[in-house]
Amino acid sequence: MALHEILMAGFGGQGMLLSGKLLAYAAMTQGREVSWLPSYGPEMRGGTANVTVCLSDKPVGSPYISSPRILLVMNQPSLERFVPKVRSGGLIIVNSSLVPIKADRDDCTVIYVAANDLARTAGTVRAANLVMLGTLVGFSKIIDRETIIKMIKKEFKAKAKFIPANVAAFKSGYQEGTRARGGSR
């Protein structure tokens, strides 16, 4: 496995820090080297929030990423700020439910997913972050699908009534990512 440098960005409260945590824990359970570095403004909800996650088979030299290979964006300010920083040949996943503009990068793979709409269909619009995470995992296959599902169940264990909708949201995103990859599993 190569080094995967991922930046997940949005407003505080959109769940990108949680998505990064789930990805990092899933990778650790599969024996990977991991770094997880959150960054957020002083606001609790509505301020900017992003997280960088590095996954590798070798020790991660630094958790700081200036040019990610993979970007997940939940909102337009994050798209405008981070899309120019993605490495050529990278992957950009955009929440098209909330971002009305396109990523101006023809040197990257760009996937538009209606994350809020898919999450609502799955049972809770608050799981749009898990739709985005599912899209990443479905497209890239950087982590085993079932391992992420186990992490979601563990995360919501104290609030078990939220598990089915969150797992369904992740799975719908996974299907979108698989479809964008060309249907391969």
Image (spheres, grey):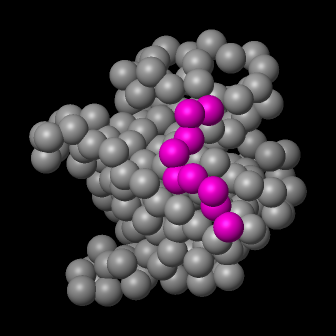
The image quadrant of residue 104 is top right
Residue 169 pos. (x, y %): 47, 60
Q: Can you say which quadrant of the picture contains the N terminus?
A: bottom right
For the point 42% across and 48% down, the residue is 51
> Which of the pair 37/72 is nearer the observer?
37
Residue 178 pos. (x, y %): 74, 53
For the point 74% across and 55% down, the residue is 3
The image quadrant of residue 88 is top right
Q: Can you say which quadrant of the picture contains the C terminus?
A: bottom right
Residue 25 pos. (x, y %): 51, 74
Q: Is residue 141 left or right of residue 174?
A: right
For the point 56% across and 41% down, the residue is 65
Q: Is 53 part of what is drawn in magenta?
A: no
For the point 59% across and 78% down, the residue is 28
Q: Is residue 3 left or right of residue 24?
A: right
The image quadrant of residue 157 is bottom left
* Magenta segment: 59-67
- Relative vertical location of residue 8 with respect to residue 107 in this rendering, above or below: below
- Relative vertical location of residue 101 with respect to residue 148 in this rendering, above or below: above
Residue 74 pos. (x, y %): 41, 37
Q: Is residue 160 left or right of residue 59?
A: left
Seen as rendered, the residue at the extreme left is 43
Q: Is residue 3 visible?
A: yes
- Relative vertical location of residue 108 with respect to residue 40 in this rendering, above or below: above
Seen as rendered, the residue at the extreme front is 61
- Judged by its main secondary structure, the magenta piece is loop
Q: Is residue 135 visible?
A: no
